[in-house]
Image: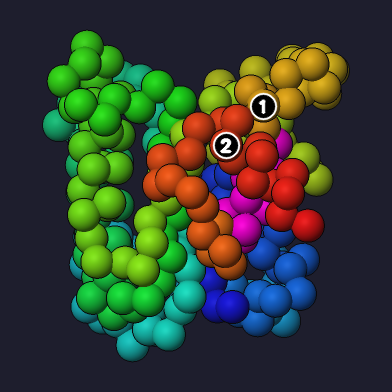
């Protein structure tokens, strides 16, 4: 299986990359991002591409992939709806539209969030934008598309968040997260579970396109 990965420097993306490189049936992981990764692996190809709204210059490098794991994400804090939509919707759909045209047999997995508003009409700005993004992705002619809606995610294997406020929170709660996860395994996920579940739906699909935290955990648990 050949996998495209967006957002490999973020917390979720780091965890997904680890699981992809560990997977025996993954022959290639190609990262697409504005900055180069600081790691090397025989299965890893790192493509630095600055303009995430236009892929015309690298289309030849985006063909022949079985799955795309889209893990790019930004906080909505301090942003207007227009600014947040540009980052969360426009950039996502620019990549997805290109990939749907080049790889119609691809499985596309998008990291959304718990509380996403599929009606696009709710009071929460970020939830409306995420809902609009999900709805647009589900209309594209991929072989399959899955919307992952995690809530709290415990970083494992040295994974760190690029958002300083989030990393501080993870550092402060690190002693508690394993205990909370043991008590609430269907609510609190890990970066490892996220990666394993993405690989599982790329291999075998899932019963529904929108997957909440409990669904993601169940898929990863039964993936072996």
Quarter of the rendering occupied by the C terminus: bottom right
- Relative depth, front residue between 206 and 19: 206
Task: State the residue position of label 2.
Answer: 215
Which residue position holds label 1? 186
Outermost residue, top side: 123
Q: In which quadrant of the rendered view does residue 77 lie?
A: top left
Q: Residue at x 77, y 66 (%)?
A: 22
Mark 1 in CB contact with mark 2 (< 8 angstroms): no
Label the magenta part by its dominant secondary structure.
Answer: helix
**Residue 182 drawn at (x, y percent):** 82, 22
Q: Is residue 64 visible?
A: yes
Q: Is residue 207 above or below residue 75?
A: below
Residue drawn at point x = 37 percent, y = 84 percent: 63
Figure check: 60 above or below 188: below
Pick the front one: 168 or 61: 61
C-alpha span from label 1 to label 2:
8 Å
Dot 1 or dot 2: first in sequence order is: 1
Q: Quadrant of residue 52?
A: bottom left
What's the residue at 79%, 16% (across, down)? 183
In this picture, which residue range is highlighted in magenta? 190-200
- Secondary element at tag 2: helix
In the image, is 205 to the left or to the right of 112? right
**Left or right relative to 199: residue 185:** right
């Amino acid at each position: 299986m050949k996998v495209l990965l967006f957002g490999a420097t973020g917390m979720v993306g780091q965890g997904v990359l680890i699981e992809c490189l560990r997977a025996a049936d993954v022959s290639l992981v190609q990262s697409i991002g504005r900055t180069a990764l600081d790691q090397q692996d025989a299965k890893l190809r790192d493509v630095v591409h600055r303009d995430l709204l236009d892929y015309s210059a690298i289309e030849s490098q985006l063909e022949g992939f079985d799955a795309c794991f889209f893990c790019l994400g930004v906080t909505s804090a301090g942003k207007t709806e227009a600014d947040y939509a540009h980052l969360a919707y426009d950039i996502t759909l620019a990549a997805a539209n290109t990939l749907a045209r080049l790889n119609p047999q691809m499985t596309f997995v998008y990291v959304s969030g718990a509380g996403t508003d599929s009606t696009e009409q709710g009071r929460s700005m970020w939830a409306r934008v995420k809902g609009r993004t999900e709805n647009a992705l589900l209309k594209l002619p991929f072989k399959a598309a899955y919307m992952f809606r995690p809530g709290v995610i415990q970083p494992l294997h040295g994974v760190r968040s690029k958002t300083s406020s989030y990393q501080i929170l993870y550092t402060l709660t690190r002693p508690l997260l394993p205990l909370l996860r043991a008590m609430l395994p269907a609510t609190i996920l890990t970066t490892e579970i996220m990666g394993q579940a993405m690989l599982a739906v790329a291999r075998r699909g899932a019963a529904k396109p929108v997957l909440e935290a409990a669904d993601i955990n169940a898929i990863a648990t039964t993936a072996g």
